[in-house]
Image: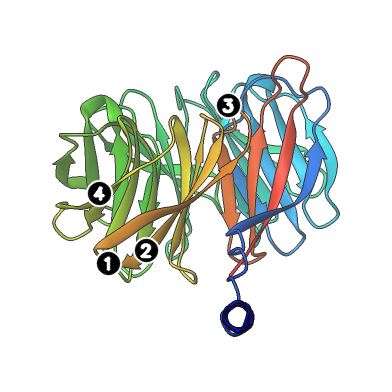
Amino acid sequence: MKTLVAAALALLFFATACPVPAQEQSALVQKRTVPLPGVKGRFDHFAIDATNHRLFIAALGNNSLEVIDVNAGQHLQSIPGMSKPTGVLYLADLNQVLVANGSDGTLKFLNGTTFNLERNLTGFDDADNLRLDPRSKLAWLGFGDGAFAVVDVASGKTSGTTKLSRHPESFQLEQDGARLFVNIPDARQVAVVDREKRSVVVTWPMQKFHANFPMALDEPGHRVFVGCRSPARLVVLDSATGSSIAEVPISGDTDDLFFDAARKRIYLSCGEGFIDVVAQRGADHYELKEKIPTRSGARTSYYSAALNQFYVGVPARGNQPAELRIFQVGN
């Protein structure tokens, strides 16, 4: 009897001294769901006005630009008149929203308050991703069978083009250098562009993993993150040489990925119905830490470091309406 009592006391002491660790907090905690009534079809790229807490969504299938107040969790406005909108860029200095339209090849400059059309550039067939070079104040727009248009946003005029081998998908600009990295899935390569010379300086073949659409950049760590769909992998490249550093299996049909530099994490929105969270354990070491369920087709997203939030566009499917899911980024 004394033996049984002693054993029970020992177990009680062990349980008290060594408690079972609490479940680790999710990297992304859903805080709000914003219904998008009447919005049909798939989404494309997003842009943020962090000062006024506004998110702009290119509703490609709906031919509209959707405006969301992410602080209040409110759908503010649906702006019609787009033509398969793809790339979106908010210019805080000019209070303008630029929208690239893939169907009619236009780049529309909208007033950032009234959303009235202020300027309409044409000639960008299959217009797609859009990024601002903060140093030069030039916008880079991927379009056509393989080209970048370089647009002076202050004057609203095109200042030149850069030829590519095939149509460009996601691309990233160095902040402390002059290079631009771009996915060209139809050519099965990543191209490196010198923004000052406006020409391709080198191409890196994607030999094992194809359909390379989304991309992010860890500039201080000299790493380029490439999301591939065939097969589904996150591929990590050395930004100096293009050599493959790591390969991480991910969920299928990824279309957006973002690098959280503060937490050393990569967030990938995947159309299979998950957000994948990959931890960076060092420049050469990466591991899949979490798969957060969303909905089939929810493959477009945006990460705001300024607001510490992650947004996922969920398209309408069957009797389920479109919505935006807002996640708080956890430590």
Q: Which of 95 and 290 is in front in this view?
A: 290
Residue hosting label 2: 280
Marks 4 and 1 close (CB-CB < 8 Å)? no
How many marks are shown on the rendered structure? Answer: 4
Neighbourhood count class around disc 1 (C-alpha, 10 Å): few under 14, some 14–19, many 20 upward: some
Quarter of the C terminus within the rendering? bottom right
The residue carrying mark 3 is 297
Q: Residue 249 appears at what percent x and percent y? A: 34, 41
Question: How far apart are the two marked residues, 2 and 4, measured between alpha carbons?
Answer: 26 Å
Residue 9 image offset from top left, x and y in percent: 63, 83
Q: In which quarter of the image is residue 187?
A: top left
Task: Tell me the number on the disc at residue 305.
Answer: none
| CA neighbours of label 3 inside 10 A, class few (<14), some (14 to 19), many (20+) | many
Q: Are marks 1 and 2 in contact (CB under 8 Å)?
A: yes
The figure's colour scheme reads rainbow
Give the amino acid type for the residue marked by disc 1 in the picture. Ala
Q: What element carries label 2?
A: strand
**In front: mark 4 or mark 1?**
1
For the point 59% across and 32% down, the residue is 298
Residue bearing the label numbered 4: 193
| Type of amino acid at the residue the image marks with label 4 | Val
* Residue 180 percent across, percent down from the top left: 31, 52
Viewer-proximal residue among 81 and 252 = 252
Q: Is mark 4 on a helix, strand or loop?
A: strand
Q: Distance between the residues labelled 4 and 3?
A: 32 Å
Q: Are marks 2 and 4 in contact (CB under 8 Å)?
A: no
The location of residue 206, given as percent across then percent down, is: 19, 36
To which residue does mark 1 refer? 283
Which residue is rendered at x = 46% and y = 47% of the image?
Answer: 257
225 or 193: which is nearer to us?
Answer: 225
Q: Reading the chain from its start, which is encountered first: label 4 or label 3?
A: 4
